[in-house]
Image (cartoon, grey):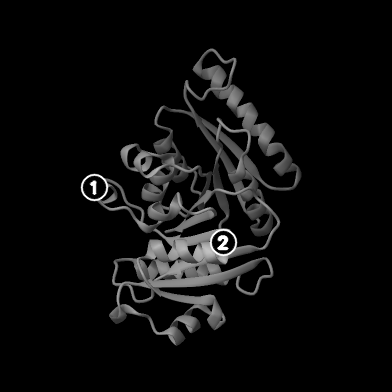
Amino acid sequence: MKIDRILVVYDPTSDSQNALDRAAIIATNEGSSIHLYACIHKDTAPAGTDNQQQAVEAQQDILQQAAAPLIEQGIAVSTEVDWAEDWYQAIIEATARNGVGAVLKSSHPHSKGERRLKRTSDWTLIRECECPVLLVKTPAGKEPRKVLAAIDIGSDKENYGELNKTILSFCQRYIGNEEADIYFLNAHKDLASRPDRGTLIRTCGVEGDKVLIEMENPDKAILKHARELGVNLVVIGNSARSGLSALVKSNTAEKVLDQLECDLLALT
């Protein structure tokens, strides 16, 4: 799975832009272009601006300054600024409008109450974005990436077979790469749904000690092994959804996001 164009959500309220730093590494390695996007409103407009037009122009200048070092490195970067109060939905619309292959956004911890009682940008992206979403929690570094990928080869859930293929395709590009150490986790609910270990190892294409099987809820198994292994990226399959289905039941990505200390990639 190669991503040609990445949308990076610029945070106008922060001096650090971890998502942009991570995107620069990906773009350098993969030859991707970056679309640097910011959505502002009166509460997040740059200081010293008196009206919407001034604010948008000032924010555009800020984005161009942030993009300049990347352009000097040979990365193709475009910029866009929107003015909208509902900036969560504006990101979703910008993603579709720009035909990007993935969205990168910095993520900050929220309590369970904040997530459930108040709509947040992270959950909006996980629930509604129809392309992969990387929620970045850690500064970009040059350390080897240790990855935990959650799959379920015995799942009877609709569309999970395709999600498994997507996860495996993503991970198998990096198996054998010195800069990535990849583990696969298959959590199952009971003995009847336990996967065959040999089949799982052959499916994943890694050594046996890189394949983990756990009879546990997926979210609990992911959190346990992510901490034990000290991974800096968790990869999860995600079916984009909205409306009542999103409100009634949280998906695995939502359940683990705030408890993980590493980046989370939700693949569709």
Where 8 falls versus 28 (above or below)? above
Q: Which residue lies furthest to the top in this view?
A: 50
Q: Quadrant of the C terminus?
A: bottom left
Where 107 falls versus 193 (above or below)? above
Q: Name the residue under label 2.
A: 2
Q: What is the number of the mark on residue 152? A: none
At a point 56% along the width and 57% down the height, the residue shown is: 3
Please name which of the two marks, 2 or 1, marks the residue nearer to the observer: 1
Can you give x and y, in whole percent of width and height, for residue 17 in the image? Answer: 61, 40
Choose the circle earlier in sequence order: 2 or 1.
2
Can you give x and y, in whole percent of width and height, for residue 53 in the image? Answer: 53, 18
Residue toward you, 163 or 185: 185
Three-letter amino acid code of the residue under disc 2: Lys
Answer with left or right where residue 241 lies relative to residue 8.
left
At a point 46% along the width and 87% down the height, the residue shown is: 198
Residue 14 appears in view? yes
Image label count: 2
Can you give x and y, in whole percent of width and height, for residue 71 in the image? Answer: 71, 42
At a point 55% along the width and 54% down the height, the residue shown is: 262
The residues tagged by marks 2 and 1 sit, at their Cα atoms, a distance apart of 33 Å
Can you give x and y, in whole percent of width and height, for residue 43 in the image? Answer: 48, 22
Q: Mark 1 points at which residue?
A: 244
Where 218 falls versus 191 (above or below)? above
Residue 173 appears in view? no
Q: In which quarter of the image is residue 86?
A: top left
Proximity of marks 2 and 1: CB atoms separated by less than 8 Å: no
> Considering the numbered disc 2 on the image, is that residue within a helix, a strand or a loop?
loop
> Considering the numbered disc 1 on the image, is that residue within a helix, a strand or a loop?
helix
Dot 1, how many residues are within 10 Å of its Cα: few (below 14), some (14-19), or many (20+)?
few
